[in-house]
Image (cartoon, rainbow, N blue to C red):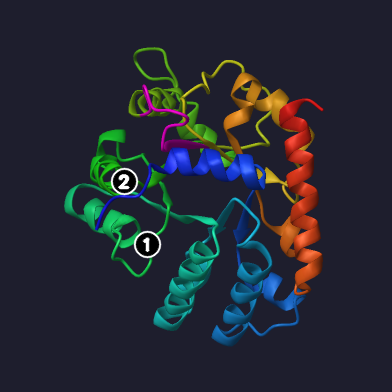
């Protein structure tokens, strides 16, 4: 089975053609209730199928949050498998938001679950946690390179608790978050048009001018919509790296369901607003 074209190249093309937007698939209990669905596998399946139907043929990236599927056990994971398969078949790139992080053979197994091409959960990219040391991600990096997939490494996250680790100063004077960004810049060196190893950087963090976000890779930016950030904030937060930002919106789009047309219109508005903000128009 031949490897895919590198994730970074596929992502650049998808954002250029479909607009720079990632929509989360986050079927938490309160959102299922807003849609008039039961908090069970049947409700989960209806929710996920509707989002994929509404988005997958027109949005660059869909990002299912695996925890909301895993809480239903094997039947929930089966829904996740189907959602990933159908989303990719319709042309969307799938970023699995699983935030895996471990060492050695365990990290290898996590990577194989999502980045091996014959896996039922095979995705275009995976979110990972580097806080057992960046080197602990080596099995995932190697498998991503082998299969043409990507990683999004937690670097500067939008949750307030993250600062106690990510803004901590190392002995060399750099913060932990800056160190993760530097590792990713090395991974992406020389890649065109975009590297495949991205960072998660919150859109709600304000001025990040003290950080070098030019990692030649994508910056997955949660916080747009319900968390308070807007597309207009992106140039101020990300500066010269804004063209490589993949803004993530979840509730801001999903609250318009279960109507498929309303979901599509909401996503289209966000994509247009992001495109305008990034281009300066």
Where residue 281 is drawn, which disc sits there? none
Q: In which quarter of the image is residue 243?
A: top right
Q: Crowding at label 2, few (<14), some or many (≥20) Cα neighbours within 10 Å?
A: many
Q: Which of 112 and 264 is in front in this view?
A: 264
Comparing 47 with 103, the one in front is 47
Q: Position of residue 260 (x, y in %)?
A: 75, 71
Classify mark 2: helix, strand or loop: helix
Q: What secondary structure characterizes most of the magenta part?
A: loop
Q: Foreground: 119 or 137?
A: 119
Residue at 67% x, 26% y is: 237
Q: In this view, does 168 lie above or below 156?
A: above
Quarter of the image with the C terminus is: top right
Q: Which residue is under mark 2?
A: 144
Asked if residue 159 can be seen in this view, the reply is no
The one of 85 and 157 positioned closer to us in this rendering = 85
Mark-to-mark CA distance, 1 and 2: 11 Å
Which residue is at 37% across, 62% downward? 122
Residue 157, x across and y down, in percent: 55, 39
Q: Give the range drawn in magenta.
A: 188-200
User: Which residue carries the number 1 mark?
Assistant: 122
Closer to the N terminus: mark 1 or mark 2? 1
Q: Provide residue 250's location: percent of width, then percent of height.
A: 67, 56
Residue 156 is left or right of residue 267, and the answer is left
Question: Is residue 169 shown to the viewer in this render?
Answer: yes
Answer left or right for 20 relative to 73.
right
Q: In which quarter of the image is the N terminus?
A: bottom left
């Amino acid at each position: 089975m031949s490897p895919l074209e590198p994730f970074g190249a596929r992502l650049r093309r998808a954002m250029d053609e479909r607009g720079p937007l990632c929509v989360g698939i986050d079927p938490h209990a309160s959102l299922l209730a807003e849609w008039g669905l039961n908090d069970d596998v049947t409700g989960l399946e209806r929710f996920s199928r509707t989002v994929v139907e509404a988005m997958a043929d027109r949005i660059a990236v869909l990002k299912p949050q695996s925890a909301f599927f895993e809480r239903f056990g094997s039947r929930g994971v089966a829904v996740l498998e189907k959602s990933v398969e159908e989303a990719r078949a319709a042309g969307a790139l799938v970023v699995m938001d699983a935030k895996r992080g471990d060492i050695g053979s365990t990290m290898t197994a996590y990577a194989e679950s999502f980045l091996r091409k014959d896996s039922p959960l095979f995705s275009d990219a995976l979110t990972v946690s580097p806080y057992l040391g960046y080197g602990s991600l080596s099995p995932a990096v190697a498998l991503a390179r082998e299969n043409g997939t990507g990683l999004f490494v937690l670097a500067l996250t939008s949750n307030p608790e993250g600062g106690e680790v990510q803004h901590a100063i190392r002995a060399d004077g750099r913060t932990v978050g800056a160190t993760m960004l530097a590792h990713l810049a090395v991974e992406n060196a020389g890649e065109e048009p975009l590297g495949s190893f991205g960072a998660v950087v919150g859109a709600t963090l304000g001025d990040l001018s003290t950080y070098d976000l030019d990692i030649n890779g994508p910056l997955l930016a949660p916080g747009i919509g319900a968390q308070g950030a807007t597309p207009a904030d992106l140039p101020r937060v990300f500066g010269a790296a804004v063209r490589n930002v993949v803004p993530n919106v979840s509730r801001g789009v999903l609250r318009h369901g279960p109507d498929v047309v309303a979901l599509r219109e909401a996503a289209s508005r966000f994509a247009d607003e992001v495109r305008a903000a990034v281009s300066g128009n």
